Amino acid sequence: MAEIDELTHRLKITPAKYGVPEFELRDVTKVFGSGDHRVRAVDQVNLQVLPGQRLGVVGESGSGKSTLVRLMAGLLQPTSGEIDFQSRSIVGLRERDLGELRRQVAMVFQDPRSSLDPRMRVGRTITEPLRSPLLRGRGGIPQDAAARQDRLVEVMTKLGLDPEMADRYPHEFSGGQRQRIAIARALAPRPRVLIADEATSALDVSVRAHILNIIVDRVRDDGLTLIMVSHDLAVVRHVCDSVLVMRAGRAVEEGPVEQVYNDPKQRYTRQLVAAIPRIRA
């Protein structure tokens, strides 16, 4: 678990900030299907995410973790309930009215192959958000080609990617490199919130720690709020300062990581914590 110790060391110097919530969810429900085929993927969830917080969202497959963060990112609309981003409701907004959310909330998905256009050179992929009409004139988004090129070089360098590789296509990179490209694309507009939805689970074990280190470094150095969906409770314990436990669409337990892991109140949480692999001396 040397990589876990390294993650802990990296994040100890970044205390959480407090203030107006980045997100506030009130009785949020998302139902898919109809009639006998209705599924409550998210069921009356209440949640606050504060600036600088590092929230881990955990639970078994099908618990509603990914649906929840997609609702927060404005990729899905709730069936009922309210979602505020920086004190403004995003429920029911049209895509053209989501510019501030799109700039300030970045999302990295599980499989980089599905989030990168195979026909687009990676330099264009990374700078694509900077060209969006939704983001034009917002938060210092580069408006000209030279400024976008400068930002491309900056963000590729920070992610350990050679800017000389910007003219290549995604298939010319390894899985770990493709995920770094996806992260670079997410960070190009200088967001405030990074949502990582199982961002390392599709990668080889040897690559996962490296990608986690990259995420940790960017969260620390860029002062980001982090929302991390993961099935790996050991990583969440060491990367995040708080945790939300989901089961069958419901938030069954929430609190500071050490409190929830050391003294879980719900039987389901106790079962999850008990299943974390232990290293024997």
Image (spheres, helix red, strand yellow):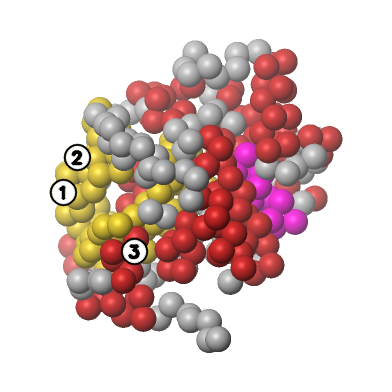
Q: Amino acid at mark 1?
A: Asp
Residue behind mark 1: 27
User: Is 127 displayed left or right of 261 in the figure?
Assistant: right
Discs 2, 1 touching: Cβ within 8 Å:
yes
Q: Which residues are magenta?
A: 174-184
Q: Amino acid at mark 2?
A: Glu
Mark sitting earlier along the chain (3/1)? 1
User: Is 254 displayed left or right of 176 in the figure?
Assistant: left
Image spot of residue 140 (x, y percent) = 53, 16
Mark sitting earlier along the chain (2/1)? 1
- Distance between mark 3 and mark 1 Cα atoms: 26 Å
- Distance between mark 2 and mark 3 Cα atoms: 29 Å
Q: Main secondary structure of the magenta part?
A: helix
**Image position of 92 with respect to 32: above or below:** above
At label 3, counting other C-alpha atoms closer than 10 Å, the crowd grade (few under 14, some 14-19, many 20 or more) is some
- Distance between mark 2 and mark 1 Cα atoms: 7 Å
At label 1, counting other C-alpha atoms closer than 10 Å, the crowd grade (few under 14, some 14-19, many 20 or more) is some
Residue behind mark 2: 82
**3 or 1: mark nearer the eye:** 3
Secondary element under disc 2, as helix, strand or loop, is strand
Secondary element under disc 1, as helix, strand or loop, is strand
Residue sitting nearer the eye, 131 or 216: 216
Secondary element under disc 3, as helix, strand or loop, is helix
Q: Quadrant of the N terminus?
A: bottom right
Please identify the quarter of the rendering in which residue 176 is found.
bottom right
Residue 4 visible at all: yes
Residue behind mark 3: 258
Image spot of residue 178 (x, y percent) = 68, 50
Q: Quadrant of the C terminus?
A: bottom right
